[in-house]
Amino acid sequence: MNIMFDLDDTLYDKSATLSHYADYLFDNRLTALNLCPQQFKEAFITQNSIIQPKAQAFSLLASQFNFSTQLSDDLLKEFDNTLHEFSVSFPGVHESLTELKNNEVSIGCITNGRDFFQRNKIRALGLDTYFDFIVTSGELGIKKPDPAIFQAGLDLFSNNSDQVCFCGDNLSADIQPAKQLGMTTFWKTRASSESEFADYVFNDFSEFDEIWLHRR
Ligand SMILES: [Mg+2]
């Protein structure tokens, strides 16, 4: 049995990580600026959750909170090099991946983002020990939902399983293309939703474990 996981907002809790990072910035790097902590935190999480170049996110924050271009450039450099130290995974991720490994499931990771940035997060979370391979859009120059990045992952499994599963949080970038390539899809979503594309829908990893045990 083979499965591939998306990283951001599937295994890696992006908003919890950004929230810790905003606290760190506020307490260590922005003390002289007299900002409202809650307002800064919300803007920081929002700007870094939008799909846009990080340089743009930081320059928008600089203009909103009146800090200098120099400070904004320094913060961006620091963010790229240290965000992974604040990485948080969703509860139960390690337990679920351990269980899959114990059952000799091959596990891959397909993630959109800059190669060093995504790999630093994976290592910091200790997820690299579970993965048979990692494919990043930064390294490949192709990003989800392009089927070619899913195919690159499929080609990396050393066994030839007739059932390959894909688990991700994004319907159009993860679930839809994976389904079209014939994979069994697990959609991680906050609301209890249904979709014509997802075979299974789950909210937390204890639910994932249950579904995995009883899947068709
Ligand atoms: Mg994602």
Image (cartoon, rainbow, N blue to C red):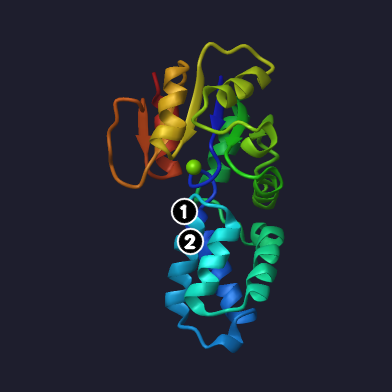
* Residue highlighted by disc 2: 47
Label 2–label 1 contact, CB within 8 A: yes
Q: Secondary structure at mark 1?
A: loop
Q: Position of residue 87 (x, y in %)?
A: 60, 57
The amino acid type, in three-letter code, at marker 2 is: Gln
Q: Nearer the viewer, residue 163 or 147?
A: 147
Q: Which residue occupies the foreground of this view, 125 or 69?
A: 69
Q: Quadrant of residue 171?
A: top left
Observer-nearest of 103 and 140: 140
Residue 7, image quadrant: top right
Q: Horizontal and vertical percent for residue 36?
A: 45, 83
Q: Quadrant of the C terminus?
A: top left
Measuring 62% from the left and 78% from the top, which residue is drawn there?
Answer: 68
Q: Is residue 120 above or below residue 141?
A: below
> At x 64% / y 79%, what residue is drawn?
29
Question: Relative to residue 35, is residue 128 drawn left or right?
Answer: right
Compare residues 164 and 103 and report the one nearer the observer: 164
Q: Is residue 158 above or below residue 8?
A: above
Q: Position of residue 214 (x, y in %)?
A: 39, 25
User: Residue 193's spot in the image, x, y percent?
Assistant: 28, 38
User: What residue would you read off at disc 1?
Assistant: 50
Q: How many residues crowd around disc 2 within 10 Å: few (fewer than 14), some, or many (20 or more)?
A: some
Up-down relation of residue 207 to residue 89 (above or below):
above
